[in-house]
Image: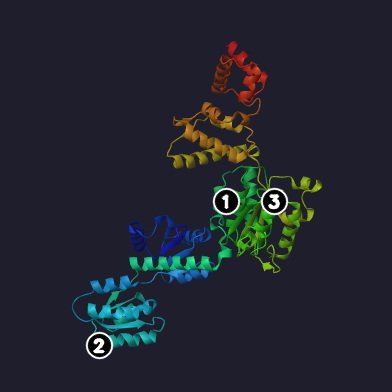
Amino acid sequence: MRNFRFSVITPNEKVYDLVQLMIQDSKRIDPEQVTLIDGSQKEAASQIADAVHSGTEALLTWEPMATRIASDYPQARVYVIQPSILDLLNCIHHAPKTGKLGVIIPFSLRDYYDDLKPQFDTMGVSFYHVAPEYDERAMRKIIRQAANHGVTSLIGTDALASLIAAQHINWIPLRPGRGGIVRAFFKALWNARRYRQENPRSAVNQSGMRAHYRLEDIIGSSPAMREVKGLARIYGATDSTILITGESGTGKEMMAQAIHNLSSRRHGPFVAINCGSITESLLESELFGYVGGTFTGARRDGKIGLFEAANGGTLFLDEVGDMPYVLQNRLLRVLQEKHVRPVGSQREVPIDVRVIAATNKDLPYEIRQGHFRLDLYYRLSVLPIEVPPLRKRKGDIQEISQSLLRTLDIRYHKSHTFDAKVWDFLKNQPWPGNVRQLAHVIERLVLVVKSPVIQVKDVLHVIPQTDIEEGQMLPGDEADCKDLTYERIEKLSRQGKSGAEIAKELGISRSTVYRIKRRHEHK
């Protein structure tokens, strides 16, 4: 199961280093599947929380940490790393050869007792007993028996150290090594495979059920964005339905994920669906699920809907304004009653889901046109939040651009900076595609510009002409923009193109073409 992802939380830095080496050297475990966390570090708690809500299928750790994590995250599968047979045999192999050797077999290995007995006899172990470590009285009795038997060295877990020392016997610590970690991993893998086989209807794609973005990932410190972020923090502390509005490309889903990660549901799933991207019949089955044999092509065992998949977490309904009118009534009933009924089923399934909806449409206008239900609008917009377009927060453009440049330079192994004149040019653009469009322009610059400093002419070269409105080709007194535009006009003129053809190709008006020509003719 190459898509199986798990996290290992070590008790200290020393064990962290050992486990890291084991994973790197192992041919049976892919390092890409493992998130390794040093449980002794200050940031361990947040790293564990991130691992849980990012979709890891198993947490592997030592006691007593395992009990604490299982208590904090009851929805997670926590596996205790315990000594394996390999670890036990290694201890015996490295034990002193003088005196009598005894072994307290961990209770987790009790099923292997009959197989271990002949090996103990061969390896010269004179005393062995299964350890009921939860019963201290019984353990004291067993260790006294070992002392009476003349045992001088006794192999046992950390839990038995003080009891063994009380009998003046040399304690040889039995701790999980490579064998224990591999054993825990394959136990978790086997259980995950069995769970998937026994619950085929729960095979919703887990990769889309986590929120990656946090509020600090949303760049912008303009007054408009500070107000929006303030609302997000307030809304995150509640459990009410949220309606996020804003133009395409403003980052509505990022905002939804950030609010989810601010909420008490942050350790639960974050499930997103675009309501306008699929057909009415498919959207109904995706949202509410269906029972087996409901329609042609349906799975034999049925399928759970996204409402059920989001139980305990958040369901993000993107482009809710495009939801078919007939489905809006069903969505309203689910929001009111907190139950879903799968397609073709007579049973209702209770759900505990917070809904965050988003749209780039003017819903009050859609209501007047009869395309959206008024009662659903009021149910969704309990807590409204509007993400402003980029043109209304131009003060954030420089901050966003620099952040994008750093990220993309690292991704493509480049190194760039912006010339100071670029900022006025970028701020004078309309950015109809908002942050998404700006991100695409920065990515093209990173890939295309070979010099370390990105200049205005570079931006003008990569930005699609349809992105520049008339009159904005020449911002302020940017001479380099003028020269570059004139050169392109002259080049097209030499190719025999008319003023109208040049204007169409450059995305400007004919009067702008002639004005640029006249300026250069009178220089």
Q: Which residue is mark 1?
A: 215
Q: Is residue 177 visible?
A: no
Q: Amino acid at mark 1?
A: Leu
Q: Residue furthest front?
A: 296
Q: Which is more toward the observer, 502 or 177?
A: 502
> In the structure shown, which secondary structural element does the residue marked by tag 1 occupy?
helix
| Residues at marks 1 and 3, CA–CA distance in whole angstroms | 23 Å
Give whichever of discs 1 and 3 has the lower sequence position. Answer: 1
Residue 201 vertical position relative to residue 256 in the rendered view, above or below: below
- Badge 1: residue crowd in 10 Å (few <14, some 14–19, many ≥20): some
Query: Which residue is at a point 71% across and 51% down the rendered structure image?
Result: 323
**Which quadrant is the C terminus positioned in?**
top right
Instruction: Please name the colour scheme applied to the rendered image.
Output: rainbow
Left or right of 52 on screen, residue 246 = right
Residues 277 and 81: in front is 277
Relative side of 145 to 211, left or right = left
**Tag 2: Cα neighbours inside 10 Å, few (<14), some, or many (≥20)?**
few
Separation (CA) of disc 2 from disc 1:
65 Å
